[in-house]
Amino acid sequence: MPQIVVTANPLGSALFDLVSPVSVLSGKELSFRQESTLGETLSKLPGISSTYFGPNASRPIIRGLDGDRVRIMQNGIGMLDVSALSFDHATAVDPLVVDRIEVVRGPAALMYGGAAVGGVVNTLDNRIPQFPINGYTGRVEPRIGGAANERSGAAVLEAGNGLVALHADVASRRTDDLRIPGFARSDRQRALDDPAVEQTRGRLINSSSESDSAALGAALTLDKGYLGLSYSDLQSNYGTVAEPDVRVDMNSKRIGVAGEIRELGTIVQEVKFKYNHTDYLHNELEDGEIATTFKNKGYETRIDATHAKLGPLTGAFGVQLSNTNSKALYIYEEAKFGDIKLTAGGRNEHTTVDSAGNSPTSTRFGAPQERKFSANSGALGALHTFPELHCVDQQWSGAGRASRGFISRGKS
């Protein structure tokens, strides 16, 4: 198998060089595990479950932690959706067009958020190509069937001449109400319900969905770096299974700019820059009428740099800014001493939150207010690599028995 390098680690470490457990889904394995939501796609991995709120909304739970304790990113930048506020809010990412998903825990997670104590889920789609493309390549994936009568498909096309690389992808999904055995509600709940209301059976009412997405990206790819931009649009309309007449109409538009310069010099070796602007709109419809609206329009940008080896230390540092007036500095370092590898991460984050005041529903908090707070985070990790195991054949006398034993060389 080719070496798997985790991109969410600033030093691009190989999978088994990382201190904390790492899960990577790509290729055929991702296709076999792919579900309609990100949470269900990852739910079968060790240590990961799902906040399952019907077939349309679920986020990953990592070692019992969910919500804002698990940061979901797209190409290293936060989603800026509202999926962490409530379990019935879907993430603004469609697994159909994702090339790879990484789940990273430990000190490297501090690069992306001080609250991400559970870990980081990074989805990669190559909408801004980072390396030269000669000719064209792509994939098409149709899907049909299942308990929800799913009809979906995705197409990805990439082309380039070695200097300019282009990316385009489209995806569409349609599902009906999920077929289920028996009643949708439990025996205990049905006993509490109004007996005059007919109980649904065989279908999970209001679990259907419709979603469409498209994206375009282009990049100038050079020997020592790249510079590119992308635009994506995701629209989704899905039912919330708790109420038979409530649906969510979601739209997320993202503009991204990214660049990288490699092999800079003897002190700073590599610099990466990423910027994303997101325009997110989420309407909750009751009987077809808008009852609640969520809007989240903003940006997130980050600059990451790796430094040359300083004694036993190799590491990275950077800055992260977002529209909530949040500013953060971080550092990540690794050191190897024989068979032991040590890692450390640190983050300082300062946030200012302003209230515009004049709340129509509150007199107590009607005046404009401002809150400022700082958070400091740290993490340590250690990895001990045991010597390779060697197979030794041992012949046993008597009764013609033979066995094969395994012994290790050195300490274990």
Image (cartoon, rainbow, N blue to C red):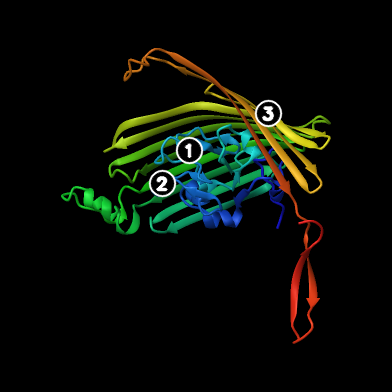
Tell me how far mark 3 sits from mark 2, CA to CA. Answer: 36 Å
Give the answer, above or below, for where 81 lies relative to 24. above
Q: Nearer the viewer, mark 1 or mark 3?
A: 1
- The CA span between labels 1 and 3 is 25 Å
Q: Which residue is mark 3?
A: 318
Q: Is residue 379 left or right of residue 42?
A: right
Image spot of residue 119 (x, y percent): 58, 41
The foreground one among 356 and 173 is: 356
Which amino acid does the dot numbered 2 rest on?
Answer: Asn
Camera-side mark, 3 or 2: 3
Q: Secondary structure at mark 3?
A: strand
Q: Residues within 10 Å of mark 2 (few under 14, many from 20)?
A: many
Q: Is residue 71 left or right of residue 359?
A: right
Estimate the spatial distance between the alpha carbons at disc 1 and disc 2, rounded to whole Å.
17 Å
Amino acid, disc 1: Gly
The answer to whether residue 211 is seen in the rendering is: yes
- Circle 1 residue: 67
Which label's residue is closer to the chain start, 1 or 3?
1
Q: In the picture shown, does residue 405 fall above or below 409?
A: below
Mark 3 or mark 2, earlier in chain: 2
Where residue 192 sits: x, y (%)? Answer: 22, 48
Residue with the most extreme bottom position: 399
Q: Amino acid at mark 3?
A: Gly
Foreground of the two, 210 or 396: 396
Would residue 154 be seen by someone viewing this image from the given angle?
no
Q: Which residue is mark 2?
A: 56
Mark 1 lies on a secondary structure that is: helix
Q: Judge depth for marks 1 and 2 and give the one in front.
A: 1
Q: Residue at x 77, y 38 (%)?
A: 223
* Residue displayed at 75% across by 67% down: 406
